[in-house]
Amino acid sequence: MCLPGDGIGPEIIEPAVATLERVGEFQFEERAIGGAAIDRYGVTLREEDLEACKEADAVLLAAVGGPKWETTDPDAPRPEQGLLALRKGLSLYANLRPVKPLAALAEASPLRPERLLGVDMIVVRELTGGIYFGEKVRDRNHASDLCTYTVAEIERIARQAFRIARSRVTSVDKANVLETSRLWREVVGRVHREEFPHIELEHLLVDAAAMRLVASPRHFDVLLTENMFGDILSDEAAILTGSLGMLPSASLGEAGEQRCRGLFEPIHGSAPDIAGKGIANPYGMVLSAALMVRYAFGMEEEAAALESAVQGAVEAGVRTPDLGGEATTAQAAEAVLSRL
């Protein structure tokens, strides 16, 4: 299932589909989400489109949002609500965001090149709990957002992090202030002791984690976070690569729970300021397609080929403006296709 969404979404999902057609045989169906769905149907995600996504083997999403649909009216639809509904409807509780800067883009990062040597981490973010999904209340004089987690929610995301860790899991919380974080720390610690004692575990307060991501990023192997902290820290980690346009993500659910095996999307937004100009960076979208064929279809060789093609294009100097170059979206896409 393809969900182009808003802004640059339609521009970057097209080359991703083209690369997928080069490495395998897939059938694609397209539906509307976000602002595009608001304009067409008056809602951010129709129930029938959600059901179609559930019946698909995987979902490839580009981006949602834009100033056209921004509002402070709590009763008005916002594009992001469609994305949250999709994650909830597909039971996608684990968001994986790999961060591995390319040597060819070292100069594009705000950090000194020597600080990027050896950086190879994955942010594992809990995706369907926390403050984003808690009860929301607002009247003329106050507003509140409830942050809540259950033991079961923390256990399953902790297991996901420990399973993919090579040596260390860094669990991020705010246990010196928040009760949800104290529960988080207790449960993660228990899962570690009982099931994964061979993996090192460290607990880190979120403010310290934000600082260490900049001061010593190669310290991290797997960064385990709740929903909001993960949203923020993964965007911070993305800057290590030189551009938000380079990072993919995979959102996964429980095995066997339903047919759909995940939602795959770049971590950047819809970039409405450059929409329609033909200069959007398609690399993060293509790398998201690589994660899709790896996690949803078990096609490791094809996933590696897609990742190698993106790396080759960047090393050859085919860079869009966000990477300090002058390449168009079409030129970057062709550079990837020519290397497959």
Image: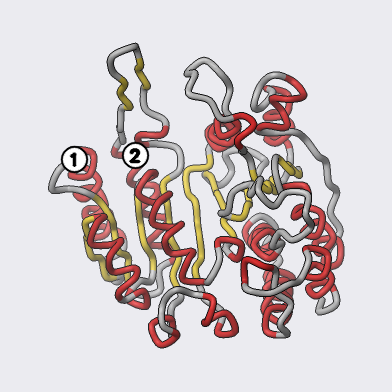
State the residue at coordinates (31%, 21%): 143
At x 62%, y 59%, the residue is 295
Image point (33%, 27%), residue name: 145
Label 1 sits on a secondary structure element that is: loop
| Residue at numbered disc 1 | 178
Q: Quarter of the image holding residue 5?
A: top right
- Please tell me which residue lies in front, 83 or 253: 83
Give x and y (percent) for residue 252: 55, 49
Residue 336 location, x and y as percent? 78, 73
Which amino acid type corresponds to the residue marked 1 in the rendered image? Answer: Leu
As displayed, is residue 306 above or below residue 17? below
Frontmost of labels 1 and 2 is 1
Quarter of the C terminus within the rendering: bottom right
User: Which image quadrant is residue 171 in?
Assistant: bottom left
Q: Residue 230 placed where, x, y %?
A: 39, 51
Q: What numbered label is drawn on residue 152?
A: 2
Q: In this view, does 29 lie to the left or right of 320?
A: right
Question: Looking at the image, which residue is at 67% across and 73% down?
Answer: 307
Upstream in sequence: badge 1 or badge 2? 2
Residue toward you, 304 or 315: 315
Gap between marks 1 and 2, in whole Å? 18 Å
Can the viewer see residue 58 in this picture? no
Q: In which quarter of the image is residue 300?
A: bottom right
**What is the secondary structure assignment of the residue under circle 2?**
helix
